[in-house]
Amino acid sequence: MDLPDADLVAELGFRQAVYAAVAVIPHGRVLGYGQVAAMLGSPRAARQVGYALAALPPDTTVPWWRVIRSDGSLALQGDPGRGPLQAALLQAEGVELLDWRVEMSRFGWAPPR
């Protein structure tokens, strides 16, 4: 699959473009919300990426758990349902967590340009 970009936003709309962008994050890797927004040509839209991911249904196949804060912390750590689920899904992919934080230099993904 090609990497999503600003043209995809125009074609699909921002929310659907976010889902397409998140779908290309490789297994065992993570991206920050702002990095996803930047892929789509809207580097200041990190919060909107979060809103789009929060709107996903529980049975989604979009790997939402691979999107975290840019500092490596899990944004959902305070959510008693989704926080532990996100941590478990990341760990199942081999991503190591220490105090709800991922080492971005080790597990972060840099999309090709």
Image: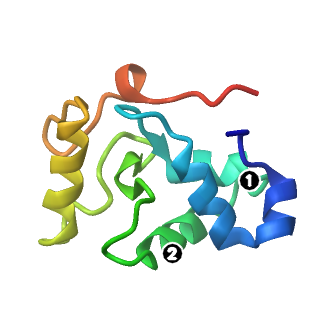
- On the rendered image, what quadrant is the C terminus found in? top right
Q: Amino acid at mark 1?
A: Leu
User: Looking at numbered disc 2 in the image, what kind of residue is underneath it?
Assistant: Tyr
Q: Residue at x 48, y 41 (%)?
A: 31
Instruction: Report how many numbered discs are placed on residues in the image.
Output: 2
Residue placed under numbered mark 1 in the picture:
40
- Residue 62: image quadrant is bottom left
Q: How crowded is the residue under tag 1: few (<14 C-alpha within 10 Å), some, or many (20+)?
A: many
* Location of the N terminus (image quadrant): top right
The crowding category of the residue bearing disc 2, from other C-alpha atoms within 10 Å (few below 14, some 14 to 19, many at least 20), is few
Tell me: residue 55, above or below residue 49.
Answer: below
Foreground: 33 or 12?
A: 12
Residue 44, percent from left and from top: 69, 59
Q: Position of residue 75 (x, y in %)?
A: 32, 59
Return the mark for residue 51.
2
36 above or below 1? below
